Image (cartoon, rainbow, N blue to C red):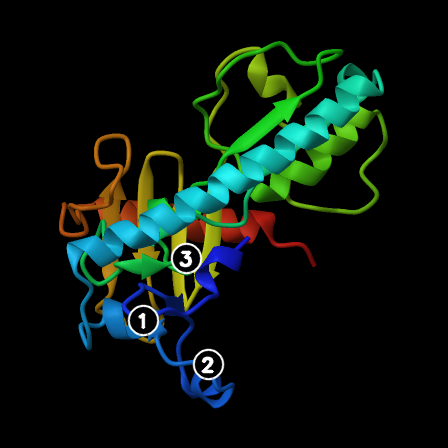
């Protein structure tokens, strides 16, 4: 999915991972480590940020064209309506929306963690747009449900096939990235770090989709979300 990021050219905006291991691999000149941008060691011009967006848009157009060919093949064979189709992604991408988190895809914020989930199976699903929060862990049980087969192991995910019928409660989610944990209850995003206790961030994503205004100092809110996160982790732990 990142082919278009991989060719270094003079003056081009190219992003790679961070750390000594990355340098030791002998990446060609012209690449910028994402941590250097996010931590202020170097900068990109507005034109370079736009170039990153353009490269990403190019990937999307290419993938869309390939998906179109796949769909044409299913229709030609007469099996499109007999196929359970599900499209999702592993992460989003940052393009300068937030200071300290300007680029890359291993950040705890919404623009990295929110991804599309598109499911099509006309025999069981009606067209509709669902606003409720679901999770990547729900993909497998949803596919199993639509295919009419039992889930083969104990998992935390649940089928969300019924979510097209009406809005359902948001499903809480927890994750870890770059030694930072985050919890999202469908409205608020909580971000914490055991290594850095001073890192305490809370965002109301129903009103603040770019995670711009930290509400951690709002009385009682942080403690309530920490308690909700701890309870969710305890409840969802599989021994």
Near mark 2 (Cα within 10 A), the count class, few <14, some 14-19 or many ≥20, is: few
User: Where is residue 179 shown, x and y percent of the image?
Assistant: 41, 70
Which one is earlier in the sequence, the residue at label 1 or at label 3? 1
Q: Nearer the viewer, residue 238 or 4?
A: 4
The quadrant where residue 198 appears: bottom left
Mark 1 touches mark 3? (CB < 8 Å): no
Which one is earlier in the sequence, the residue at label 2 or at label 3? 2
Q: Is residue 210 above or below residue 164?
A: below
Quadrant placement of the C terminus: bottom right
Residue picked out by circle 1: 10
Residue for point 48% across, 40% down: 60
Residue picked out by circle 3: 105
Q: Secondary structure at mark 1?
A: loop
40 relative to 163 in the view: left or right: left
Q: Nearer the viewer, residue 165 or 65?
A: 65
Near mark 1 (Cα within 10 A), the count class, few <14, some 14-19 or many ≥20, is: few
Which label sits in the foreground, 1 or 3?
A: 1
235 relative to 94 in the view: left or right: right
User: Is residue 193 visible in the rendered structure shown here?
Assistant: yes
Disc 2 and disc 3: Cα gap in Å?
19 Å
Q: Secondary structure at mark 3?
A: loop
Q: Nearer the viewer, residue 50 or 107?
A: 50
User: Is residue 227 visible in the rendered structure shown here?
Assistant: no
Q: Is residue 1 above or below residue 24?
A: above
Mark 1 touches mark 2? (CB < 8 Å): no
User: Where is residue 1 shown, x and y percent of the image?
Assistant: 55, 53
Residue picked out by circle 2: 27
Q: Nearer the viewer, residue 175 or 36?
A: 36
């Amino acid at each position: 999915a990142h082919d278009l990021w991989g060719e270094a050219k003079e003056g081009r905006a190219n992003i790679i991972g961070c750390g000594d291991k990355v340098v030791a691999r002998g990446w060609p000149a012209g690449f910028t480590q994402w941590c250097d941008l996010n931590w202020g060691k170097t900068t990109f011009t507005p034109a370079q940020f736009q170039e990153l967006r353009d490269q990403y848009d190019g990937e999307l157009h290419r993938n869309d064209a390939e998906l179109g060919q796949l769909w044409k093949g299913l229709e030609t064979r007469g099996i499109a309506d007999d196929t359970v189709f599900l499209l999702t992604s592993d992460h989003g991408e940052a393009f300068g929306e937030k200071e300290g988190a300007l680029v890359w895809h291993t950040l705890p914020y919404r623009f990295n963690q929110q991804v599309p989930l598109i499911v099509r199976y006309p025999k069981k699903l009606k067209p509709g747009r669902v606003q409720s929060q679901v999770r990547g862990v729900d993909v497998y049980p949803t596919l199993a449900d639509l295919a009419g087969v039992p889930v083969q192991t104990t998992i935390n995910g649940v089928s969300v096939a019924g979510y097209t019928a009406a809005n359902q409660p948001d499903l809480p989610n927890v994750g870890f990235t770059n030694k930072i944990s985050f919890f999202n209850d469908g409205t608020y995003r909580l971000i914490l770090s055991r290594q850095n206790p001073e890192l305490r961030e809370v965002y109301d994503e129903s009103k603040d989709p770019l995670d711009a205004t930290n509400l951690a100092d709002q009385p009682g809110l942080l403690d309530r979300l920490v308690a909700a996160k701890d309870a969710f982790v305890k409840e969802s732990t599989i021994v």
